[in-house]
Image: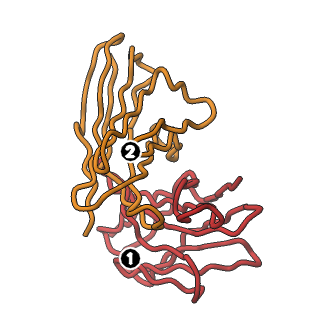
Chain colours: A orange, B red
């Protein structure tokens, strides 16, 4: 079946540095990808919708300058957490929609970010 | 806008017993409905989804869910659980009127299913 891969699965970075998380659709084209974050014991909260070749659409309350999203190709979207702080520590998950009008979505394995 | 309520944060159950995980939603428009499972330290895996047609939906691993429009519910059931079903289960909805349907998902807070011997 279709697979979405995230890398890295775990990353620890120092406060003030930036970290990039990749989300790849391995055997299908994804014109739309979604980025979520999940705090411990809580649900997933949509951060932004990433569209190939255009700017991401951010949800209310999400700082676009802090969470940079790039969707440069049909199989890759990246989330860069800039000037990370300990409160950015979270589980980040991406999902990718199959095709342009499909309603099938596959999730990546997630990336644990710890900012120390 | 939509919202999803999963009233049970934790559900303990003995192995081979039946289980029901409750999900209620609120929406001003028609929705698609989903159940996802999250095993420890892993991403989400789709269990089943309701798009249209029969209100009883069968998914993977022996799970099924029934869409009840009048009660705005989409409860997840399994007649006999296994230890391996221990995981976090999330109910989600998406706006049916949006192009492509399953776009932005609104998740419930999740239900931790703990299967005991």
Front-most of residues B22 and B104: B104
Q: Residue furthest front?
A: A53
Q: Residue at x 28, y 38 (%)?
A: A22
Closer mark to the observer between disc 1 and disc 2: 2
Q: Which mark is residue A40?
A: none
Give residue B28's quadrant in the image. bottom right
The image quadrant where one finds the C terminus of chain B is bottom left
- Packing grade of label 1 (10 A; few <14, some 14-19, many >=20) is many
The answer to the question of whether label 1 and label 2 lie on touching residues, with beta carbons closer than 8 A, is: no
Q: Position of residue B24 (x, y in %)?
A: 67, 65
Q: Chain of mark 2?
A: A
Q: Residue at x 37, y 34 (%)?
A: A70
Q: Position of residue A56 (x, y in %)?
A: 48, 37
Indicate left or right for B29 with B42 as reference. Answer: right
Front-most of residues B11 and A99: A99
In the displayed structure, would residue B16 be above or below residue A2? Answer: below
Q: Residue at x 45, y 69 (%)?
A: B13
- Packing grade of label 2 (10 A; few <14, some 14-19, many >=20) is many
Indicate left or right for B92 with A19 as reference. Answer: right
Q: Which residue is mark 1?
A: B81
Q: Chain of mark 1?
A: B
Element type at marker 1? loop
Q: Position of residue B90 (x, y in %)?
A: 50, 59
Q: CA distance from mark 1 to mark 2?
A: 27 Å
In the displayed structure, would residue B21 be above or below residue B16? Answer: above
Q: Residue at x 30, y 24 (%)?
A: A19
Q: Which mark is residue A93?
A: 2
Front-most of residues B112 and A26: A26
């Amino acid at each position: 079946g279709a697979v979405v891969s995230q890398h890295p699965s775990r990353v620890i970075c120092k406060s003030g540095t930036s970290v990039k998380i990749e989300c790849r659709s391995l055997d299908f084209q994804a014109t739309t990808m979604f980025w979520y974050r999940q705090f411990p014991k809580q649900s997933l909260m949509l951060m932004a919708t990433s569209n190939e070749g255009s700017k991401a659409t951010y949800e209310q309350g999400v700082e676009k300058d802090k969470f940079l999203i790039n969707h440069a190709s049909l199989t890759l979207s990246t989330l860069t957490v800039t000037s990370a702080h300990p409160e950015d520590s979270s589980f980040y998950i991406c999902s990718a929609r199959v095709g342009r009008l499909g309603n099938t979505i596959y999730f990546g394995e997630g990336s644990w970010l710890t900012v120390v | 806008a939509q919202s999803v309520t999963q009233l049970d944060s934790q559900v303990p159950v003995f192995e081979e017993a039946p289980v029901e995980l409750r999900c209620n939603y609120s929406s001003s428009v028609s929705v698609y409905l989903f159940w996802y499972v999250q095993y420890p330290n892993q991403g989400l895996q789709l269990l089943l989804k309701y798009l249209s047609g029969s209100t009883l939906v069968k998914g993977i691993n022996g799970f099924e869910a029934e869409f009840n429009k009048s009660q705005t519910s989409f409860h997840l059931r399994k007649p006999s659980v296994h230890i391996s079903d221990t995981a976090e289960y999330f109910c989600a909805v998406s706006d049916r009127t949006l192009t492509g349907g399953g776009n932005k998902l609104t998740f419930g807070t999740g239900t931790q299913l703990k299967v005991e011997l």
